[in-house]
Amino acid sequence: EVVLTQSPSTLSLSPGERAALSCRASQSVDTNLAWYQQKPGQAPRLVMFDASHRATGIPARFSGRGSETDFTLTISSLEPEDFAVYYCQQHTNWLLSFGGGTKIEIK
Amino acid sequence: QPQLVESGGAVVKPGGSLRLSCAASAITFSDHYMSWIRQAPGKGLECVSYISDSTNYLYYAESVKGRFTISRDNAKSSLYLQMDSLRAEDSAVYFCVVGGGPYYFDHWGRGTLVTVSS
């Protein structure tokens, strides 16, 4: 099973600041990594797929990079609606797995 | 935009059974893998089960293997999860999701709450 470790668990930032979220895989997942955003009381929403491709409707301030075991989701300038929990997920094999999440909270 | 509507969540006693349903619309249902993903209160996401488009591949998390059964009816654009021998640790919001297997999860329902408690 591929274990995904997200860091930090919580990020305290102000609107307008840059956020960088890390996701590390216990073995290579190539670029088969997705990111999801979840707000309280809502279902998760796909943000990024195949490591660096923005999902439909996701603004350009979101970017993703990485391959094999190290991945980063960057939000260049935080908007109020970006404060949420973000999960990474790998789909490189049939045993899917999620990371534990990073919460971006308002400082 | 695809719509996924879950139903069937309830409060049930340990050892009991429930059947969750998911009705899909605005999507060619038969073309997609489908999954059930759950989230316990205040916790992260767990893919409980998924089923391939043609039903020839089924996956179950170890935590539910032998107790849960996933199925689909492509003619009705519907997904199901039969949950037997329920335990307290099965308490969660269950989301119906497009994706699974080698695919990411690109459309999610709003979820249905399952509570297992005596």
Image (cartoon, rainbow, N blue to C red):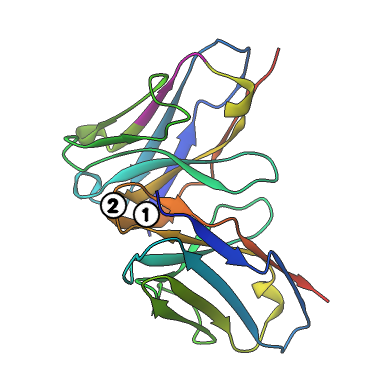
As drawn, A20 above or below B118:
below
Q: Which chain carries label 1?
A: B
Q: Is the magenta stretch mostly helix, strand or loop?
A: strand
Residue under numbered circle 1: B2
- Where residue B31 appears, as percent x and y from the top left, is 19, 49
Q: Residues within 10 Å of mark 2 (few under 14, many from 20)?
A: some
Left or right position of B54 against B66: left
Label 2 and label 1: CA atoms lie apart by 5 Å
Q: How crowded is mark 1: few (under 14 residues within 10 Å), some or many (20 or more)?
A: some
Residue under numbered circle 2: B27
Q: Give the range drawn in magenta.
A: B80-85
Q: Which residue is drawn at 26% across and 33% down?
A: B76
Occupied quadrant, residue B73: top left
- Where residue A36 appears, as percent x and y from the top left, is 51, 63
Report the front residue among A70 and B1: A70
Q: Mark 2 lies on which chain?
A: B
Occupied quadrant, residue A87: bottom right
Q: Do the residues labelled 2 and 1 touch (CB within 8 Å)?
A: yes
The secondary structure type at the circle numbered 1 is loop
Left or right position of B11 against A2: right
Q: Which residue is drawn at 49% across and 87% down?
A: A60
Which kind of residue does numbered mark 1 sit on?
Pro
- Where residue A34 appears, as percent x and y from the top left, is 42, 66
Report the front residue among B95 and A86: A86
Numbered marks: total: 2
Report the front residue among A16 and A32: A32
- Pick whichever of labels 2 and 1 is earlier in the sequence: 1
